[in-house]
Amino acid sequence: MEFKDYYATLGVTKGASAKEIKGAFRKLARKHHPDVNPGKPAAEARFKEINEAYEVLGDAEKRKKYDELGANWRMYEQAQQSGRAGPQGWPSGGGGGGGWTVDLGTGQGTRMSPEELRDLFGSDDPFSDFFKTFFGGMHEPRATRAPRPARGRDLEHPVDLTLEEAASGVTRRMSIKSGGHARSVDVRVPAGVRDGSRVRAAGEGESGSGGAASGDLYLRVKLQPHGVFERKGDDLHVHVRVPVTTAVLGGEAQVPTLNGGPLRLKIPPATQAGQVFRLKGKGMPVVGRGGAHGDLYATVDVQVPGKLTDEERRHYDALAKLERGDRP
């Protein structure tokens, strides 16, 4: 039976704090969750290893026992199987008399009941053979053990948003079905969310068992295409039609905005088709940055007349002669 280094599984040191262990577990669990990796057995196996490691290191008592006995786990296993008096801190003796004799570091044996041993040595829901040996049920029939409290499962639902809704923020009412029951949950989607963002509603997932906390609800944002604007990060891009005379002589153009009236853009003389102008702070809100916005980029499309009047043609003819260098 291979020894399992739970610290290595979570990528933390043995001296890591409880907060660091929890953070490492959450990061790895999100990455390897079966819902995120459908049809990938390796990811599912990795997810089970991560859960098993956190089952021990996330519990102060289990972690303490693991730190004390982990390096000598095989001797512990042999002590369990043989019923002999084990090394310091290990159980000895079988179930005779309703318990085991345990040396808790005082040099003297202490008689403990199966219930007390379960409290000392850990879980009744083993994941691997090593876990079962190290934190198992101490030979008591499984049917007599009380089920462990389990946190509720996280739920994820897609939500479609227009670009305008993403810019201003919106509240969505979701119908959640869990355990044969349906309920409504109002979730506030913050302004500035991007396509693919996950919006968390804490405690709105499936209910936990045995008094454990409920899971979370995540909304996966899908932005609908927009007919005028293109979003790139927190910036917006738009095309502005400018008459050829304005592009040549200079003037002003109207630039549309996502929420609000158009903006006036100064067009300098001899502006070329495809030239880009930046309107600072007129893009999308930046999530979590207190009023910060991206920029709006306006690309000039020079508009050529589709039809000329007789007078317009005379002027263009005169301009063409000047360009050719013709003199009267």
Image (tube, helix red, strand yellow):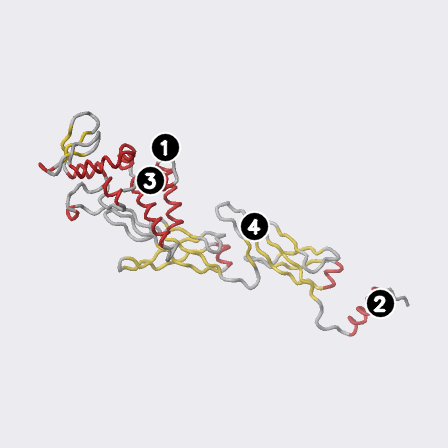
Foreground disc of the pair 3, 2: 3
Residue at numbered disc 3: 6
Pointer 1 residue:
15
Quadrant (top left/top right/bottom left/bottom right) for the N terminus: top left
Label placed on residue 294: 4
Q: Given the image, on which type of amino acid does mark 3 rest?
A: Tyr
Q: Nearer the viewer, mark 3 or mark 1?
A: 3
Say which element carries label 2: helix
Three-letter amino acid code at disc 1? Gly
- From the top left corner, tell me how far across and down residue 109 is, in percent: 15, 28
Quadrant for residue 104, please give it.
Answer: top left
For this orientation, the residue located farthest to the bottom is 310
Give how far across and how far down residue 25 sits, in percent: 36, 43
Nearer to us in this view, 5 or 320: 5
Q: CA distance from mark 3 to mark 2?
A: 84 Å
Residue 310 position within the rendered picture, expressed as x and y whole percent measured from the top left: 78, 74
Q: Amino acid at mark 2?
A: Lys
Dot placed on the residue nearer the N-terminal end, 3 or 1:
3
Q: Which mark is residue 321?
A: 2
Near mark 1 (Cα within 10 A), the count class, few <14, some 14-19 or many ≥20, is few
